[in-house]
Amino acid sequence: VPELASRRHIESIIPIVHAAEEAAKMSLGDIDGIAVTHGPGLVGSLLVGLSFAKSMAFATGIPFVGVNHIEGHLSAIFLEENAPSFPFIGLVVSGGHTSLYRVDGFGTYKRLGQTRDDAAGEAFDKVAKLLGLGYPGGPIIDQLSKRGETKAIRFPRPSLGKNSFDFSFSGLKTAVVNYVKSHPPSDNGYPEHLLCDLVASFQEAAVEVLVKKTLQAAQIQKVKRVVLA
């Protein structure tokens, strides 16, 4: 709920900054720069963070930079010891985003495809909610899937046309909803084996699309490296 998220940001941002200072044993005077997400995301929440960071930079004279957080996801691999060389295909998968990029250097990105409706993580969360599994859905479904049969139920793998790098998970989510309607659980829910088969089949369908399109992009772009964020 965007408005509630924004209000929660207002309540939390100052205590979180103080907690970070205490954990790092630093004060604002020890900081060389202030970076803040300016997008993409929920506008109200971004506005809270951006206004706070700009105010802090103005009051202290500390240099300030706005960051696209998808670029942050794609660049996080360079915190690893064995960072890749350019170019690489970047698959960004989260609750709000599912996108494919060709990355030729820092600041040089070409978006090859993106979700047209639900992001992959959003579909996981909605299926978990439908099945009463809790939030966030990804880790719960992944754990249950390990005990299930991935081919038990045939769910759709939307491709959106030949050589399209866009994603769509709304139809897959609807297929799970329709399955639950046609195979309703008892008052005590599904038996464990059936629940595990159901989520394993769903996860297999979602991940198969992610893998297939990422490898297809790498082949068509003639890029040998893939980065997952």
Image (spheres, helix red, strand yellow):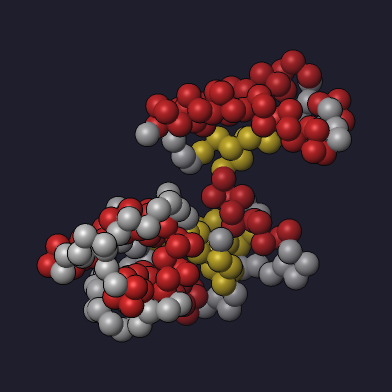
Residue 45 appears at what percent x and percent y?
Answer: 49, 30
Q: Residue furthest top?
A: 59
Give 80 or 204, whichever is nearer the viewer.
204
Residue 204 appears at what percent x and percent y?
Answer: 37, 75
From the image, which quarter does the N terminus lie in? top left
Q: Residue at x 58, y 37 (%)?
A: 37
Q: Residue furthest front?
A: 188
Q: Is residue 198 above or below residue 125?
A: below
Question: Could you tell me if residue 60 is visible in this image?
Answer: yes
Question: Could you tell me if residue 65 is visible in this image?
Answer: no
The quarter of the picture where residue 32 lies is top right
The quarter of the picture where residue 154 lies is bottom left
Q: In the displayed structure, does residue 80 sit left or right of residue 192?
A: right
Q: Residue at x 45, y 77 (%)?
A: 146
From the image, which quarter does the C terminus lie in? bottom right
Q: Residue at x 66, y 56 (%)?
A: 76
Q: Is residue 66 above or below residue 83?
A: above
Q: Is residue 196 above or below residue 167?
A: below
Residue 138 appears at what percent x and percent y?
Answer: 45, 61
Give 89 or 204, whichever is nearer the viewer.
204
Q: In the displayed structure, does residue 214 sit left or right of residue 34?
A: left
Residue 109 appears at what percent x and percent y?
Answer: 55, 56
Give 161 or 133, whichever is nearer the viewer.
133
The quarter of the picture where residue 42 lies is top left
